[in-house]
Image (tube, grey):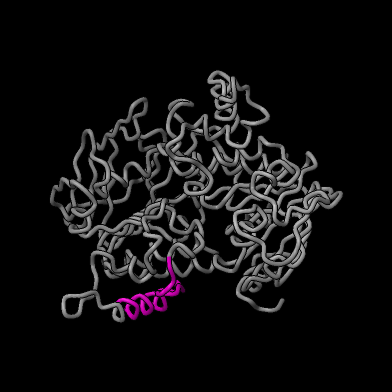
Amino acid sequence: MTPPPSSRAGTAVELSGITKRYPGTLANDAVDLSVRHGEIHALMGENGAGKSTLMSVLYGTERPDAGTIRVDGREVNFSGPADAIAAGLGMVHQDFRLFDSLTVAENVVLRAEPRRFGLLDRAAARRRVGELAEEHGLPVDPDARVATLPVGVRQRVEILKLLYRGARVLILDEPTAVLTPDEAGRLFTVLKSLADQGRSVILVTHKLNEVLEGTDNVTVLRDGRVTARLRTSDTTAAEIAEAMTGRRVELERVHPTGAPGEVVLSVSGVRGVDLTVRAGEIVGIAGVAGNGQSELIEALAGLRPVDTGRVELAGRDITHASPAARREAGLAHVPEDRAAVGTAPAASVAENLAMGHHRRRLATRRGLLHPKSLRAHGRALIEGFGIKAPSPDAPAGTLSGGNLQKLVVGRELAHEAPLLLVEQPTRGVDIGAVRHIHDQLIAHRDAGHAVLLVSAELSEIRGLSDRILVMYEGRISASYTRDDADEHTLGLALAGAKT
């Protein structure tokens, strides 16, 4: 395949021979990347392929061991993100860089505040953020505290930060991971408009369809090296997937429906929601971020108090039970925020994989975990879920976002709990891992467990769920069988239309 054309005059960003090593890992191995003015350029690869590391080098948060970076033809040597921002770069990271105690407007304008008489002009900040949110179809309350926002809305705030600064080179790391198809479409409309103005966009993503439909060129990494440079108009999803994985990948899979049995989860009047989930069944909840699905799952998991209503697990009232008591009763939970809620980043991979298992399954000595048992358990799950980690003793915070997601999903499935609450199970996960996680969820269901699934990916909801519920403004607004839930019907329901 002919590589995309590049010339120094038309090149916005050029990385040459970028090499970055960590203890036990060669994250980037002499990587070259060239992005032109007015181009939307996708960067793809499996989890741990080196994508985020490469973008961190470009943005100044990591220093390369070798190689050069040029912006608009001028060689640069960033000592930090401030230098990159000054050079016209902006980046939205996978792990959000927001201050929970500040409002949306304060986060967006931070370090670029509108001022009046030398002080922050809060009215101007709120007005400008509100205008940006409306202009780009990213609804958010400028006065809301970030701590109160679900993950999907926090992503909008990150995107608004970048748009507010008017960067000439926009680096987006999995920007549509928490967006519905309509929201993602509106985002790409914004990106195409920015590209038409001469700005450049580097899009780090695992979503093949959005790459094929919304980008000009794609560079593929595997094990830290470039394996393909392709024009998206001349390639296919299968070709990109093979370049990412080194093998042919079955992209479209239809899972058979389950055989529901007895009711495992019964919810009555909790946050205005009634629902049941049966053994041997996956019930999917679809909804635009901010419509109450995250708060509902937190209430069911014991992370948020239940003021009214009743929650029963296998006939046992757990309405006011602690999270630990719910686990003991047979509940496992994959939270949507894998870093802040799902893991302890400073603890080792093995320690994170043991969480929730340590009281019953792992050998202890005088109340302390036996190191040999801890590592053996960790190695088994690392191998079973393809988690790329230097060793079981490595801090979980050093893993890529996708590998951290595999850690959380693998740990919770290993509980073999009667009820699994799972939010965004494949967010930021590569193609091969998506298939593996989906297979594991189906196997978990077929083993007689109940699964309540929340996902922003309609294809995931439709592909896995036996029944589909739609949440709108905090209520269940529609219910479908899988056969009745085509994307058009679901899309209308997500927007609040009666179907």
User: What segment is highlighted magenta in the picture?
Assistant: 125-145
Residue 483 appears in view: no
> Magenta stretch containing residue 139, yes or no?
yes
Residue 182 at x, y = what percent? Answer: 53, 69
Question: Quick one: quadrant of the N terminus?
Answer: top left
Q: Nearer the viewer, residue 358 or 110?
A: 358
Viewer-side residue, 160 vs 460: 160
Please state the total of marks drawn on the protein image. 0
Q: Which residue occupies 40% across, 58% down?
A: 215
Left or right of residue 15, residue 245 in this image: right
Q: Looking at the image, is 47 positioned above or below residue 470? A: above
Residue 490's place in the image compared with 451, above or below, is below
The C terminus, quarter of image:
bottom right
Question: Looking at the image, which residue is at 58% across and 32% down?
Answer: 354
Magenta stretch contains residue 355: no
Q: Nearer the viewer, residue 455 or 241?
A: 455
Could you tell me residue 326's position as x and y percent?
69, 47
Return the x and y of residue 279 as percentages of the image width and height. Answer: 81, 47
* Residue at x-position 67% and y-position 41%: 439
- Please tell me whether residue 111 is drawn above or below residue 277 in the rendered image: below
Q: Outermost residue, right direction?
A: 262
* Residue 232 seen in the figure: yes
Q: Nearer the viewer, residue 227 or 327?
A: 327
Tell me the quarter of the picture where residue 22 sits: top left
- Rendering coords of residue 64 (x, y %): 24, 37
Instruction: From this view, report whether residue 342 is shown above or below residue 270.
Output: above
